[in-house]
Amino acid sequence: MNSCFIKNGRVIDPARGLDGPADILVEGGRISAVEPQLPAPDNLPAVDASGLWVMPGLIDMHVHLREPGQEYKEDLRSGLLAAVAGGFTAVLAMPNTAPPLDTAPVISGLMSKAREIPGARLQVAAAMTRSRKGQELNEYQDLRSAGASAVTDDGSWVTDSKVMRRILDYAQVCGLLPLSHSQDPLLAQGGAIFEGRVSARLGLPGIPAQAEEIAVYRDLALAELTGKPLHICHLSTRQATGLVRSFLARGLSVSAETAPHYLFLTHEDVGDYNPNAKMNPPLGTAEDRASLREALSDGTITVIASDHAPHSVLEKEVEFIDSAFGITGLETSLPLMLELAREIGLSPSNLAELMSRNPARLLGLPGGTLAPGGPADVTIIDPELEFTYNSLDGFSKSRNTPFEGRKFKGRAVLTMVGGEIRYRWPNSSIL
Ligand SMILES: [Zn+2]
């Protein structure tokens, strides 16, 4: 069944300037009408969205699904189910798997497997360079034909500026968005957390903010040189955010994302060697956090992505210095952003832009809007629903989250992909 009638909701679709009461008719997996008052069709199931927000399906453009190679941490099924439970109708999987996603057969195989899973849609970022070594470009035309929508060596920075220049040129010709993990690897080498007061107190090697600043500057300068699009992943520092702002003011077609944890936590949350506050880039200072919040409000950062990075206890519950970087995020990203929206005054339309419309536009994906004719990828949010997060209730195989036990207000209560209800919050009265 991929037809239904969504009635009485507050429909939020910034692409069409909509925020108000409306009904939505879904037929054959597509949106067929959005109007303030549609006659209820008597042959279709109805979803009563009274008191709820109805948004274009959320898209998380930075997730690690660990397949192939590390399925004990996550696999396509658990990751795509965790995504719909978090309100996402599509995710962009990063290519640093084993082997990496760097050839057309690997990518088309993964995408066809994902189509059998009743979760979020899978989109793929292919590796930028052969074996992610930062030297030779992959066959972008083939990767694009296989279904990739972006290229990145996420986890590593392409240190050779001449190679990166060619990547920006070639990616744009092939219709792929280049995503940069902008961090100087030699300056960051050996670091476990942000270099500052906390690293000094704990006696841990630090990663200076300049590791991000240097790399972001180089990447922005190459975007200016080539005149080509570039997307900066997981911005985390005040200095790098300022660089993005100043290059945007010069008219470059660059974009940047940050992750919810950088908007809530700081290096102080590492506390007494908490492995779930260890990620790369590292959590910065309260000043960094404030500047990221400001950058969301002023439009410097236009995308929120979770950087969902599942790890088993084998990689996390070890000596802090050896503990793996990264935390899960698919199931906490939206509740955190709803909390932030209340704190700093982002509107539901702002959230829909950051978490749906802008990722869709940048990646050239269908969706990001509820316009008639498009796929019926819809996220229904209850902004008042209070719940306590327990990672055991979720679908991810991993539990490396700093938000365990946090009390939230607001979450996705229904997630629809292509007109099919793929997730429904069990305690909701929505159906
Ligand atoms: Zn990264």
Image (tube, rainbow, N blue to C red):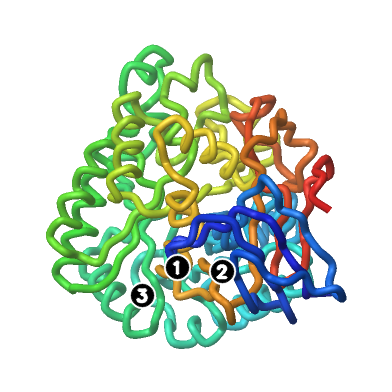
The residue at the point 19 percent across, 65 percent down is: 252
The residue at the point 72 percent across, 31 percent down is: 387
Give whichever of 37, 368 is nearer the camera: 37
Q: Earlier in the sequence, mark 3 or mark 1?
A: 1
Residue at disc 2, secondary structure? loop
Residue 244's spot in the image, x, y percent? 23, 51
340 lies above or below 241: above
Residue bearing mark 1: 16
The amino acid on which the numbered mark 2 sits, given as a three-letter code, is Leu
Which tag is nearer the camera, tag 2 or tag 3? Answer: 2
Residue 73's spot in the image, x, y percent? 70, 48
Which tag is nearer the camera, tag 3 or tag 1? Answer: 1
Residue bearing mark 3: 136
Residue bearing mark 2: 370
Asked whether residue 36 is in view, the answer is yes
Packing grade of label 3 (10 A; few <14, some 14-19, many >=20) is some
Quarter of the rendering occupied by the N terminus: bottom right
Asked whether residue 61 is in view, the answer is no
The amino acid on which the numbered mark 3 sits, given as a three-letter code, is Glu
